Amino acid sequence: MHHTVLDAAFVQDPYPLYARLRREAPVSRAVTATGLSVWLVTRYEDARAALADPRLSKDARRIREVLEIRGGVRVLDESIIEHMLNSDQPDHTRLRRLVGKAFTARRVEALRPRIEEISAGLLDGINPDSEIDLLTAYAFPLPITVICALLGIPDADHDAFRSWSNTIVTNSEPEEFERAQSGLVAYLVQLIDRKRREPGEDMLSALVAARDDGDQLSERELLAMVFLLLVAGHETTVNLIANGVLALLRHPDQMARLRADLGLLPSAVEEFLRYESPVNMATFRVTAEPVRIGEVEIPAEEVVLVSLGSANRDGDRYGDPDQLVIDRGLGGHLAFGHGIHYCLGAPLARLEAEIAFRDLLTRFGRIELAPGRELRWRDSQLMRGLVELPVRLTPA
Ligand code: HEM
C-alpha cells in the first residue's frame, strides 16, 4: 500500500488528493508533514460513521501517549488538555452538560447586539477605496472580541489576550509558544479567581458557579474548558468568514445572488462551511480497539484523521461538489463534526457569520480581490485558513 504524504502542496490545495483518495483508497495510510503516521478517512459516509464511533477515542491521556511516542506533534500543557473535546464518555457527558448550562441559546442570542456593535466598529475603522487585508482588519478581530465578551474578559485585557491566543493557534516558534501558553494560563487562573470574588453576567462567572456548586468540575477541568472555548471558537470562525468571502469572490454569480437576496444568508453560511471547511481534517482520534472503517481494518492504538473537508466534497453525497451553490439548503455537512463532540459553538459561529456577511455586503457595493497577489493558505494540518485576504472595497 502506498503512503500519501500530506505535504506543503497538499496544504495549498488538498482537494485533488481528497478526490483521488475517495475514489481509489477512501481509508488509507498517510504521513503528516511532521512525520506522524495516520489513517485518513475521506468519504462522507465513512467520516460520519467514524465521528460517531465510541471506539475512536479522544481521551487526552491516550492521545498524548500516542502523539508523544510517535512524535512530531506539539502537545499542550497538562493543565489545559483535559477538556471535553479531549475526553470520552462518561467524562465527556459530565463536562458538556456543565458548560451546556452556561452556553445556552439565550446567552448566544443575547450577544447579537454586541456582535453587531463589534462588527460595525471594525468596519468603521476600515478606510474604503484602499487595499486592505480583510483578515487582519475584520475576520480575525471579530471572533476574538466576541469570545472576550462571552467569557467576560475586561476590555483592557483584550490585546494581551488576543496576542497570546494568536501565538498559540499559529505555527509559532517553540519558545514563543511556551511563553504565550504560560502567560495565558497564568492570566486565566487569575481571571477565574476574580470571577469567583466578583461574579458578573458572563459565561465564565456561570462556569465558576457551576464548579463551586457541588464537585462536578475540578479547578483543572475549569481551566481547560476556558482554554478550549477560546481556541475552538477563534481561528475556526476567522476562517469561516475569510474562506466564505474568498468563495464568493471566486463565484461572482453566487455573490450577485446573495446580494440580491440576503434571505439566502443562512443557507449561504452552511454552504461556505461545506465548500471550504475551516476544520479541514478534524482533530485526532485514536483507535481504542481494532476498528473496521469501510473496507479497512485499522488496528488498535492508531491515529485516525477524519477529513471533514473531503467528506464535504464527496460527489456521492453532493451533486457538483466543487461548486459553491449558496441555496443547496441547510445542514447535512460535517464542518461542525458529528456525534457527541458536535460543535458546541455552532449557533454562535452561525450568528457571527450571518452578521459578518450581511454587514460586509451591505456596506460595500463592491468587494474585489486585490490584483496581482498570490493567495497563500496557512501551514496547518487541521485548519484551512488564509495567511491574508487582500481586497479592495468600494462603499455602497
Ligand atoms: C467542537 C468546528 C466554532 C466550541 C468542534 C468540532 C468541530 C468544530 C469540527 C468537533 C471536533 C471533533 O469532533 O474532533 C467549528 C467550526 C467553527 C466552530 C467550523 C466556526 C466556524 C466554535 C465556537 C465555539 C466552539 C464559536 C465556542 C465559543 C467548540 C467546543 C467543541 C467544539 C467547546 C467541543 C465539543 C465537545 O467535545 O463536545 N467544533 N467550531 N466552536 N467546538 Fe467548534
Image (spheres, helix red, strand yellow):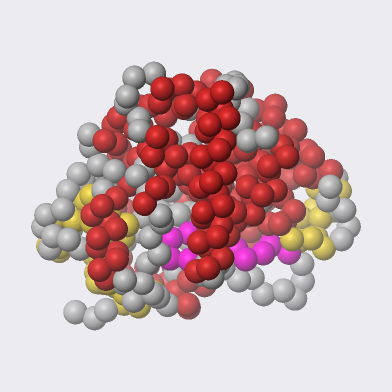
Q: Position of residue 323 (x, y in %)?
A: 51, 58
| Magenta extent | 380-390
The correct choice, above or below, for 237 with respect to 26 in the image is: above
Reply yes or no: does residue 381 show up in magenta: yes
For this rendering, which residue is in front, 51 or 60? 60
Q: Is residue 336 visible?
A: no
Left or right of 79: which side holds 90? left
Q: How many marks?
A: 0
Quarter placement of the C terminus: top right
Q: Position of residue 64 (x, y in %)?
A: 29, 58
Q: Main secondary structure of the magenta part?
A: loop
Residue drawn at x 48%, y 39% is: 226
Say if 238 sits above or below 33 in the image: above
Q: Residue at x 24, y 63 (%)?
A: 66
Looking at the image, residue 295 sits to the left or right of residue 269; the answer is: left
Q: The N terminus is located in which quarter?
A: bottom left
Q: Name the residue located 13 percent from the left edge and 60 percent from the top edge.
A: 300
Q: 115 or 244: nearer the eye?
A: 115
Snapshot quadrant of residue 373:
bottom right
Furthest residue to the bottom? 2
Residue 77 picture location, percent across and down? 40, 55
Nearer to me, 311 or 234: 234
Q: Residue at x 52, y 25 (%)?
A: 196
Would residue 318 be counted in the magenta stretch? no
Q: Which quarter of the figure has residue 312?
A: bottom left
Image-based side of 359 in relation to 238, left or right: right
The answer to whether residue 373 is visible is: yes
